[in-house]
Image: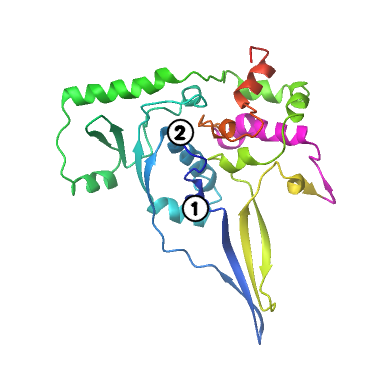
């Protein structure tokens, strides 16, 4: 249903210049990077990724501090969603109330039938787009078939995560032995954070030209799994994989709620699918809760 790459790469680019400076006869001249004239149409956005975009909206544009790069790309984006009609073993969007049906955040949402599509309009932009297309009113039979197809995906979801009081559960068990157990398997490879559609950690560095007369300030994706990400005051705070995995999971499922009022997980299952040692965060939460894994 979802591949390794989410729509995050277009709204929050992996590498982007945020400022530049050039040397002149009067000294260094600093310039902002002009906004890009780019507009995307996202076709095939699943419900979990709609939820992820909403989470990043809360991070980048629905607060006192607005990221202008994200805002410009987000405002121009046309979002055409596709409802899931089939689930895979790593999906747990139902546990996170983020799917499998698309309910908001789209301009148009499609449900694929064997011989047609049922289309839902979610915004004035979507309505305007539909006015240019040759469409017909969906029949009661088609609407029913679309509902059945969406229900099929829900019924196929077998992975669950109990989110009851999950913030207090994780933050109240920072010394649980499970953190050490998962650290013995974790490679700190960063795969989970790179494929996550909501992770937003980044670092900034200055990149000079070869002759030294021009410098670009570049923002790049970073991750709390990198050894030196927590370098502060002459040392690394999280120098063990145990502490880095704990930081990731507790931020994603607990302290993210304190920061933004929502969970940082949408149940897309990418971190499970692309972990080379098959670490499953739903199993880790269940182990800390004391239930079956």
Residue 147 shown left or right of residue 287 in the figure: left
Identity of the residue drawn at 43% across and 50% down:
74
Foreground residue among 117 and 102: 117
Viewer-side label of 2, 1: 2
Question: Magenta residues, as a range?
Answer: 233-262
Can you give x and y, in whole percent of width and height, for residue 76 in the image? Answer: 38, 54
Identified at 27% across, 44% down, the residue is: 126
Marks 2/1: CA distance?
19 Å
Q: How is the image coloured?
A: rainbow
Q: Which mark is residue 70?
A: 1
Q: For the N terminus, give its image quadrant.
A: top left
Is disc 1 surrounded by few (<14), some (14 to 19) or many (20+) residues within 10 Å?
A: some
Q: Is residue 251 magenta?
A: yes
In this image, 216 relative to 61: left or right?
right
Q: Position of residue 128 (x, y in %)?
A: 23, 48
Compare residues 284 and 171 and report the one nearer the observer: 284
Give coordinates of residue 166: x percent, y percent: 61, 22
Q: Residue at x 24, y 44 (%)?
A: 127
The residue labelled by disc 2 is: 48
Residue 167 shown left or right of residue 242 in the figure: left
Quadrant assignment for the C terminus: top right
Q: Are marks 2 and 1 in contact (CB under 8 Å)?
A: no
Callout 1: SS = helix
Q: Is residue 30 left or right of residue 241?
A: left
Q: Position of residue 159 (x, y in %)?
A: 52, 20
**Front-most of residues 228 and 73:** 228
Secondary structure mostly seen in the magenta stretch: helix
Q: Quadrant of residue 290?
A: top right
């Amino acid at each position: 249903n979802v591949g390794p790459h989410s729509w995050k790469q277009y709204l929050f680019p992996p590498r982007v210049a945020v400022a530049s400076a050039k040397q002149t006869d009067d000294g260094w001249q600093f310039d902002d990077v002009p906004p890009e004239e780019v507009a995307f149409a996202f076709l095939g956005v699943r419900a979990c990724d709609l939820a992820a975009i909403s989470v990043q909206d809360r991070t980048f544009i629905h607060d006192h501090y607005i990221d202008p790069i994200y805002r410009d790309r987000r405002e121009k984006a046309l979002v055409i969603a596709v409802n899931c009609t089939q689930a895979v073993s790593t999906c747990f969007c139902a546990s996170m109330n983020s799917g499998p049906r698309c309910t908001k955040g789209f301009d148009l949402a499609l449900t694929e039938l064997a011989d047609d599509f049922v289309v839902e309009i979610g915004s004035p932009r979507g309505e305007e787009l539909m006015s240019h297309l040759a469409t017909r009113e969906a029949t009661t039979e088609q609407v029913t078939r679309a509902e059945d197809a969406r229900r099929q995906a829900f019924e196929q979801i077998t992975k669950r995560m109990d989110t009851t009081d999950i913030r207090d559960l994780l933050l109240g068990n920072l010394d649980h032995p499970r953190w050490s157990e998962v650290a013995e398997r974790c490679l700190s490879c960063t795969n989970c954070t790179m494929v996550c559609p909501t992770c937003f950690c980044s670092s900034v560095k200055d990149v000079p030209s070869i002759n030294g007369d021009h410098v670009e300030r570049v923002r790049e994706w970073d991750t709390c799994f990198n050894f030196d990400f927590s370098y502060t005051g002459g040392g690394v705070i999280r120098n063990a994989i145990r502490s880095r995995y704990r930081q990731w999971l507790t931020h994603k499922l607990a302290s993210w709620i304190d920061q933004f009022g929502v969970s940082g997980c949408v149940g897309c299952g990418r971190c499970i699918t692309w972990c080379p040692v098959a670490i499953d965060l739903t199993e880790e939460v269940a182990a800390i809760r004391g239930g079956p894994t």
